[in-house]
Image (cartoon, rainbow, N blue to C red):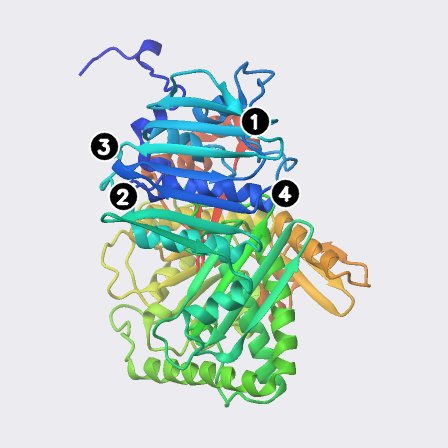
Amino acid sequence: MKQDYSAASITVLEGLDPVRRRPAMYTDTSRPNHLLQEVVDNCVDEVLAGFANRVDVELLPDGKIQVSDNGRGMPVDEHPVHKMSGVELIMTTLHAGAKFDNEAYRFAGGLHGVGVSVVNALSEWMEVEVRQNGLHYQQRFEHGEAKSPLSVIGNVAKRDTGTVVTFKPNASFFDSASLSMPRVLHVLRAKAILCQGLTVSLKHWEGNQECTDIWFYEKGLEGYIQESTNGNLIPQQPFAHKVIGEHESVDVAMGWSKERSDQLAESYVNLIPTPLGGTHVNALRTGITDAMREFCGFRDLLPRGIKLTAEDVMSQCSYVLSAMLKEPQFSGQTKERLASREATAFIGGVLKDAFSLWLHEHPSEGEQIAEFGISNAQKRIQAAKKIKRKTYTSGPALPGKLADCTSQHAPDCELFLVEGDSAGGSAKQARDREFQAVLPLRGKILNTWEVDVATILSSQTVLDITQALAVEPGSDDLSKLRYHRVCILADADSDGAHIATLLCALFLRHFPELVRAGHIFIAMPPLYRIDVGKEVFYAIDESEKQGILDRLKTEKSRSQPVVQRFKGLGEMNALQLRETTMAPDTRKLVRLTMNEPNKTHDVMDMMLAKKRAKDRRTWLESCGDEADIQRYLSDDAVVATS
């Protein structure tokens, strides 16, 4: 290994080299399906913008793929800064596109500016044809590089516009060079279903026989879900709702079946499939569950002691959800999970209102759906009662201030570490006694970052936490862990952030196995309360507040929204604390993770070590404004990476 390390040792990857070096960072490398999807997505963006109504795909011999549309065509003029045609700039430059400024496209699936350039980088060759302004243009690329300039090869009619992209994926970048045909058929059909007025065709070969499939759906989502479930749904005419807002729109169709098998659960953002769900799916589940709870309460359908969860209501539900967002944020280039927080308030709110209205207009079908949810809840409760909970029999008794839960199943149990006795009292009233326990903490705990085990256990607060968890500091044995979710609940002010940081330091330094196993969370109380007439909304941050205001503007509410910012726990009563911070279907939790342990250690050392006081001040003065957290919503938690 070379011993010298200088600036000359640094390699800068230019152009499309990063894609070719690390293709898995930019696309799915199992098969070339995602390359085809990227090109199709660009065509569909023209449809969304109102300039095209047809997308044609042809799978040619020898693994070649051709995708065409009748949109405006890629720009062929010279870019004023980069001095190359728009076609060449799009195909050879990462993060080059027309979807960053919201002027050329209102809603679009291609947002990162890397999709079609990645296709070019991972192809043996690519040819782009553009019909525009009465001329027919063509340019060829090989291994990501332009082999000829964009040139005119003929004339076309003035009204004949569009783009044709033909490419051959480079087999060396993929586990299998062949396309998965079921995935191709599913994606193309979904585009036609989700985009009204779009015709999608696929021409391919099966043996020596040429096959052509054409999709055009007049009934949209309703027709699709009926066809996919053979009409075996309650209600027979699926619940469907569509709302178009200023910055978002949502279109959904759904129904319930008697059996849990063969459920259809598909979600899309700007016509891009999101198989891992995300914030829009969470919003759907929350909105529909809230509406069902209100309906059951209004008609007195719930047996005593039964509380419906989202899983109870949605486990037998088939749905297709299509969301349109102006600037969606995905967790990764493959766009399999939506991370946009502002979508939650808009989608959840409008679907709750619409489904509530539908339930009251269709009480018979509503009661049948409620029976499914109640039956699922009863089965869940009975199953929990059959499991005997492991008890913490060795060592000292449980802390006196601990308000334990009654559940006998540790994986379902949660422990809230709450700042202060006053907030702890509110949390005890707000909790669900079945599975949520509360341990109030008095004041700021010991800074344990540079303290050994013997010293930290001399702190009563740390000892209480250790006894409640039934896990010794530094131990890798989690078999006796009494709660699989440990939630830090502190005020949304600077003191609360300090306490949360000290607790994070305790777990990172002395209970690292709990962190690695994903058991530690930070609760996120809201920063904003929005009053509109008799309705009250809560927002965790600025983007969610804006989503709520956009929704209210869409609904043309007569009352003027009143927005208040508050610290959190001390200003909320037990009911508000339950709805905003503790109820699983409406709360937001941040999971504490260590993606890069060494980097995590360095950051915490900078923040908490006494020996780094001088470095800490220098760092805060120079870099304090650069701190950032990305949040990715899962079914019951938000995973945080920094």
Q: Secondary structure at mark 3?
A: helix
Up/down of 158 relative to 502, above or below:
above
Residue at left offset 47%, top offset 50%? 200
Of the numbered discs 4 and 1, the one sitting upstream in the chain is 1
| Point 57% across, 64% down: residue | 423
Image quarter where the N terminus lies is top left
* Percent position of residue 354, x then y: 64, 70
Q: Earlier in the sequence, mark 3 or mark 1?
A: 1
- Three-letter amino acid code at the position of disc 1: Pro
Q: Residues within 10 Å of mark 4 (few under 14, many from 20)?
A: some
Residue 626: x %, y % from top left: 54, 32
Q: Residues within 10 Å of mark 2 (few under 14, many from 20)?
A: some
Quadrant of the image for the C terminus?
top left
Name the foreground residue: 324 vs 417: 324
Q: For the residue carrying disc 3, how many other residues have a C-alpha within 10 Å: few (<14), some (14-19), or many (20+)?
A: few
User: Which residue does the numbered mark 4 point to in the structure image?
Assistant: 106
| Mark 2 → mark 3, Cα distance in angstroms | 11 Å
Give how far apart the Cα atoms at labels 4 and 3 are. Answer: 37 Å
Residue position marked by numbered label 2 in the rendering? 30
> What residue is pinned by disc 1?
75
- Identity, as a three-letter code, of the amino acid under mark 4: Arg
> Tag 3 or tag 4, which sits nearer the N-term?
4
**Snapshot quadrant of residue 538:** bottom right
Q: Earlier in the sequence, mark 1 or mark 2?
A: 2
Count of marks overlaid on the render: 4
Q: Which residue is mark 3?
A: 172
Marks 4 and 1 sit apart, C-alpha to C-alpha, by: 18 Å
Image height check: is 216 above or below 38?
below
